[in-house]
Image (spheres, rainbow, N blue to C red):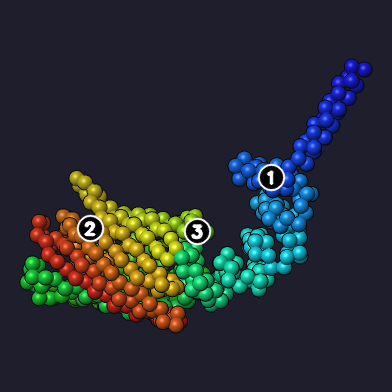
Amino acid sequence: MKRICSITIALVALMVHFVTFQANAQDYTSDELFQMARTAAFEEDDYPKAIKLSKQALEISPDYSDIRIFLGRIYTWTDHQEEAREAFRYVLERYPGHEDASMAITDLEYWNDNNQAALEYCNKGLEEHPDSEGLLLKKARILNNMKRFDQAYQVAENLLEQHPENDEARSLQRTIRYDSAKNKLSVSHDFSWFDSKYPAHLHDSPWHIVGVDYSRYTKIGSVIGRVNWGRRFDNTAFQYEIDSYPYLAKNIMAYMNVGFSDHSAVFPRFRAGMSLYFSLPKAFEAEAGARFLRFSSNTWIYVASVSKYYKSYWFNLKTYLVPGNEKISHSYTMTTRYYTGGADDYWKFSFGYGLSPDDAVSVQNYISDYRLKSAHIGLGFRKSIKRFNVIGLSASYINQEFRKDQKGNQINTSVTYIRKF
């Protein structure tokens, strides 16, 4: 008898609590319940509570589209796909092409590898909102994922024309460019002039480097073959290089390089390099790697960098570290690009301290065990012409040690032409 009384009391207490909760819930407006649901989801990480509060808000205001889209997104995040679709379709049936609902259901289908369905929902949204920044960006991503590169590139190009400050679109277009350019032929000429402070054999004999390379995009990434001809110290030589940019995993790409030459007074006899690039949230990118150079002796150089797209700008800070017997020598370069259009349309400004093993003009200075001090500043631009042609011009000023405690001034210029096909 006592047990029955205890159970009865417990049931009565539960009913009182339920009735009280329902009464309290009815005291809130749909807006207040919506705010409580957002707090539960974003601050408390309590998705079941957020779902319950959202449903209570919808009982009061069943056509409150923001709440129903929010509920659908929570279902998406918790892998309840059919419930999410039902929530988004409810809104789209009543408000065809609703921008937020179109973006939400596009995300749902895209994240679940339903590219065709994602594209259809995205296009329906764009019929009502043709200038939607969010929908255009999603459409470019979907088309790129479907390997419809030409269309993806054009959508990203149109988006950047309307919203040149969109750093995510800029980063995406760079990815599309790498994915879509199956073939690329490049020709470049670098010229280095030295002032009268340098020894006569340098002042009277400028350096030249002419490079020709062919790039092919494959399923694993880009592969590049390159031949360089150089003239330095009245010596001439050829250098043969292979670069590759394989995709190792989602958001991880590698850079690998190997090169040979027949004259160490012009190029390293052997060079190799590798870096890993990590695509990070909010348009950040990080790099970590190493370079190896063999002249008469071997040199290891370690590299690290961080990049960021911000509106129409790209910022990159890079450092090279060279271990020595007594200390580590280091160099730094800051590069900024201001984009005026697509991925191949920008102005470039750079400045820094020290040498770069990736710069064919300065790499020869690694012959010396003593790390020659230098400071540099440069300006350049790149311009695409009908997308498949690219021209580039740049110039830099370098204040460089050519012997310990002896400095001179150097001017480098570079001209590049690229043809994609």
On the question of residue 172 being in view, the answer is: no
Q: Residue at x 35, y 54 (%)?
A: 304
Label 3 or label 1, whichever comes before in sequence order: 1
Above or below, 98 relative to 303: below
Q: Mark 1 = which residue?
A: 32
Q: Amino acid at mark 3?
A: Asn
Secondary structure beneath dot 3 equals: loop
In the picture provided, is 397 more to the left or to the right than 248?
left
Residue at the farthest top position: 2
Circles 3 and 1: CB atoms closer than 8 Å: no
User: The C terminus is located in which quarter?
Assistant: bottom left
In the picture provided, is 272 more to the left or to the right than 54?
left
Q: Amino acid at mark 2?
A: Gly
CA gap between label 3 and label 2 equals 30 Å
Secondary structure beneath dot 2 equals: loop
CA gap between label 2 and label 1 equals 59 Å
Q: Mark 2 = which residue?
A: 354
Q: Viewer-nearest of labels 2 and 1?
A: 1
Location of residue 166 in the rendering, given as x and y in whole percent from the top left corner: 48, 65
Q: Mark 3 = which residue?
A: 251
